[in-house]
Amino acid sequence: MTAPYEHDDATTGPGRVVVIGTGLAGTRVAHRLGERATLIGEEPHAPYNRVLLAEVLAGTYAPEVIELPRATGPHLRTRAVRIDRERRLVQCENGDEVGYDTLVLATGSNPVLPPLRGLFAPGATELPGGVHAFRTMDDCLALTEAVTEGTRAVVIGGGLLGVSAARALARRGAQVVLTQQSERLMERQLDPRSSELVRRHLTALGVEIHTECRVRGVGVADGHVRRVELHDGYVLGTDVTVLACGVRPRIGLAQAAGLDVRKGIVVDDALRTSDPRIRAVGDCAQHADTVYGLATPALEQADALADLLTGADASHPGYTGTRTLTRLTLPHEAGPLDLAAFGETEALPGDDVVQLADATRGTYRKVVVRGDRLVGGVLVGELATVGALAHAWESDESLPADDAVGAPLLHLLTHDGGL
């Protein structure tokens, strides 16, 4: 639990609500509040589900398919440039000033741009030709236009976003090289064995993968990046380069307004910032020292805030944190590779581990038990048991005392209920 900031009782009613940000969290809050909420977002597109951008890039979905349910209140397509806390106004790039009684910051996150030699010319602020982040619908549409059959594409970053982007580009017919600085793909979510299964799947799609490989710089010709230079001197020719090096909270607006900002905008269990009239949710928010940067916590924060602002549940405890589960499906003509990971997927000394693997079917299941509690797990290729395992993990309750790592855990790993 995070202690609430001190606040005046006069601020308990939401009154006029302004939401800055049209991602999952901001749009969910505005949708839940209906006519009383004004939504401000700089993207020209209707709000969309950012999680599904890779499916748009792969050609699985048209952009309109991933649009979010629309809020019924006003929607201003402009950038918020300043918060005047004294007058309780949001000043916008188009000259509008929007008054609020409650302001919700859902400003999301920005892609991390790695410090690569040659990426920016002296004084330049725009990426050179052929280089794309993969964060917004505009990024996705630009990539879709740039990639045709045989296009050489280099993806820098082998986390969840990089794996998704590489798979999508390969499905569009690109010749894809994926570079990852650490020793394995998706090292934050997966253990070595499950990461290797993901690697094999991408390789079967034609993706060339380089791990333990740091990118040193890029080579530009006629304003367009044509090569990617690795630390060991190896050079990759490229037509399209995708930066998938992670994200960081977008906190500039809050910082300029004098709010308490650390890694993200600091909030308590009521999602209040250091100014009780301003709340924050989603990728930009830091709750209990944690910045999640994931869809599930963003939606849970948005729903908790909407409940608090509408008074839907007088006993609502607020937001108390999220235990996150990562799920990913990598389609392939021979059959999709499904994976799920939660908690700690690698054991510490003294932990117990139960694993089941089937090399023929390409399936792998593993759970980690610490004392009498399930602390994490990873499943690849067969997810029928993920519901039961996730419930046991989320509840954080003691496993049956008779045999904590025997029959009960094997039952959870093998029974086909749980979804």
Image: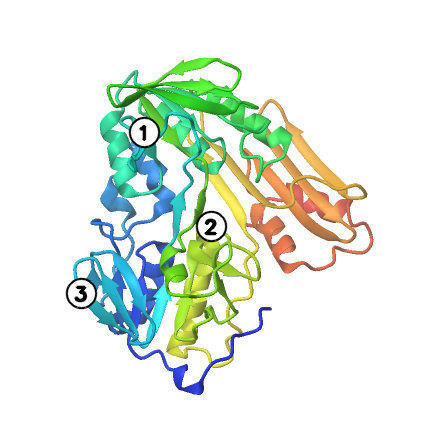
- Name the amino acid, label 1: Ala
* Outermost residue, left side: 95
Q: Residue furthest front?
A: 122
Closer-to-camera residue (144/128) = 128
Q: Quadrant of residue 128?
A: top left
Taking depth in this image into account, of 226 and 178 the one nearest to the observer is 226
x, y percent for residue 216: 47, 23
Q: Which residue is mark 1?
A: 121
Element type where label 1 sits in the image: loop
Q: Is residue 251 above or below residue 405?
A: below
Residue pointed to by mark 2:
293
Residue 310 drawn at (x, y percent): 37, 77
Q: Amino acid at mark 3?
A: Asp
Mark 3 vs mark 1, CA separation in Å: 35 Å
- Quick one: label 3 or label 2, which is nearer the N terminus? 3
Q: CA distance from mark 2 to mark 1?
A: 30 Å
The secondary structure type at the circle numbered 3 is: loop
Q: Quadrant of residue 277?
A: bottom left
Say how the picture is coloured.
rainbow
What residue appears at the point 52 percent right and 69 percent down from the top-left corner? 268
The residue that label 3 is drawn on is 96
**Element marked by disc 2:** loop
Task: Confirm or deny contact between disc 2 and disc 1 (CB under 8 A).
Answer: no
